[in-house]
Amino acid sequence: MRVLFTFAGGNGHFRPLLPIAQALAAAGHTIAFTGEPMMVPLITAAGFTAFPSGPDLGSDGERRPLLPVDRDREDADFRDGFVRRTAPRRAEDVLALCETWAPDLLVCDEADHGPMIVAEKLGLPHATVLVIAAGALIRPDLVDDALNEVRAAYALPPQRNLETAYRHLVLSPFPESFRDPRFPLPPTTQSFHTPVPGRGPVPGWYVEGRPAVYFTLGTIFNTESGDLFTRVLAGLREVDATCVVTVGNLIDPAEFGPQPEHIHLANYLPQDDVLPYCDAVLTHGGSGSVLGAITHGLPMVLLPMGADQPHNGDRVTELGLGTVLDVIEATPADVRDAVSAVLRDPSYRASAGRLRDEVASYPSPEKTVPLLEGLLR
């Protein structure tokens, strides 16, 4: 079976697909990925054939001011950016790729509607992998009309309630209880768990018996953070814990000046290497960061900036997994107090542990292989 994995966006859209692709490859199937051009090196580094498609949606490296959270703006950005502008371009490129690479099956991230249209047009089955933890950003009332505009250009009939995205098989790496109850999972959903690596070599920053906190703004929003790193670092100076901070490959850690001994700055560290040694996570609340914290049973402090992050923040608060700070108003003292609270109060860790156990109870990625093979039958 030849399987083409497609995703629109950056690492947060790529990584949820990876365990499934690895399981299919181990079962003897032929795998390729297609995503935005800037993601090609990451795909090939993971050991897979990569084809560029569509526009680059990731950061261009330009530093931008920090904006207040505006959910209406983020809704419009997703609808007009991912659906109206990006889906047609990705559909065009993936259609041409399908003619040359000839996949039997497409596996698409839930934000990548262009290739789903291609699959329907060519009569190919496709599976959809969820990449948005709370499920409140990619929702029918926001997406349906814009998606139908794109479908009309391919002479496809209108659809409602994202039925074409969910018609065959939906794979979800997130705990079902984390999803916003206003947007229940489609009936075609099968959950799976992302493998949790054991502790690797002890990192140089780790101090036995001392709590550790990981602070990250992911791979996209770090260049749109204004003075946020400065404020957070000032707060972490007063936290009684080892603090590991990654600022991204487009920012020089040296610009923040000397740091106290308990704060360790780096451009990038693999999340799987850091989280097994941590006791809490301070993050913007992207779905990948949230899932990483949940998978390791870690309480969170969130500073939502945009996209799906405010919705994830809602669920973190409602489920008692941590606290949420206003990204504009948060002072160093607020950061200090919030991080200290989630480290001190065992209720946050207990709640995170319940969701960790929920995810751990799901089938492994290898169990998705017969489900995907069954789509061809």
Image (cartoon, rainbow, N blue to C red):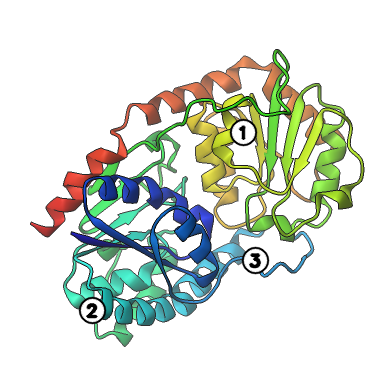
Instruction: State which quarter of the image contains the C terminus.
Output: bottom left
Please report whichever mark, 2 or 3, sits nearer to the chain's N-terminal start.
Answer: 3
Please report whichever mark, 2 or 1, sits nearer to the chain's N-terminal start.
Answer: 2
Circles 2 and 1 in contact, beta carbons < 8 Å: no
Extreme right residue here?
A: 258
x and y, in percent, of residue 232 in the image: 81, 41
Circles 2 and 3 in contact, beta carbons < 8 Å: no
What is the crowding at mark 1: few (fewer than 14 residues within 10 Å), some, or many (at least 20)? some
Say which element carries label 2.
loop
Whether residue 291 is situated above or below residue 125 in the rendered picture: above
Say which element carries label 3.
loop
For badge 3, the amino acid type reads Ser
Name the residue: 44% across, 31% down: 196
Residue behind mark 1: 274
Say which element carries label 1.
helix
Name the residue: 24% across, 86% down: 155
Rendering quarter of residue 50: bottom left
Extreme top residue here?
A: 209
Which disc number belongs to residue 157?
Answer: 2
Please report whichever mark, 3 or 1, sits nearer to the chain's N-terminal start.
Answer: 3
Could you give the CA–CA distance between mark 2 and mark 3, rounded to whole angstroms?
A: 35 Å
Could you give the CA–CA distance between mark 3 and mark 1, rounded to whole angstroms?
A: 24 Å
Residue behind mark 3: 59
What is the crowding at mark 2: few (fewer than 14 residues within 10 Å), some, or many (at least 20)? few
State which mark lies toward you, 2 or 1. Answer: 1
State which mark lies toward you, 3 or 1. Answer: 1
